[in-house]
Image (spheres, helix red, strand yellow):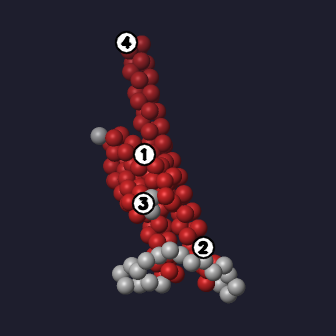
Amino acid sequence: MGKILIDSQLYAEQDNRKSYMKTRAETIFGIAGGFFGSLIAAFIFYATLVNIWPGGAHTMYATSSVFGYSDPFVIMLGIGTITLILGLMGIAGGILAKTDRKKGGKLMLTAGILGFLLFFWTWILPGILLTTGGIMAIRASE
């Protein structure tokens, strides 16, 4: 009788460890993807602000008119803001995946896919991390 109880406790502990490791992996993917997305946003803000400093590097952005605005400074600040919001969504999804995997997974998946659609080349690393973490979180919640 004692042997059966010990074995069942051992299996329960192993299941808890597997669940904990999956949650950790999803959290790490979400936070890392969001961090890299926020770094990209910081670089976009830096590149934009260097352009307006007196004596700064006068870089010409290849931006077209967006909603009637043709000022490259405004367009680049908008792109940086959207990138920052997506990065913070990824971080929030990674943190939320600890408690509610399905909601955290949806946040990470949304940020990863929107980033791919909007900023393909700059969003490759954060997009892969966020999409992977989101899929893992949603699959683990079922």
Q: Tell me the kind of residue under disc 3.
A: Gly
Q: 2 or 79, which lies in front?
A: 79
Q: Residue at x 44, y 84 (%)?
A: 70
Q: Give me the C-alpha separation between circle 4 and circle 1.
A: 43 Å
Binning the other alpha carbons within 10 Å of mark 2 as few (below 14), some (14 to 19) or many (20 upward) gives: some
Q: Is residue 6 above or below residue 141?
A: above
Q: Residue 115: give its label.
A: 3
Q: 71 or 108, which lies in front?
A: 71
Q: Residue 47: give its label.
A: 2
Q: Tell me the kind of residue under disc 2.
A: Ala
Give whichever of discs 3 and 4 has the lower sequence position.
4
Q: Give me the C-alpha separation between circle 4 and circle 2.
A: 69 Å
Q: Tell me the kind of residue under disc 4.
A: Met
Q: Is residue 46 above or below residue 74?
A: above
Q: Position of residue 66 (x, y in %)?
A: 39, 79
> CB of mark 3 within 8 Å of CB of mark 2?
no
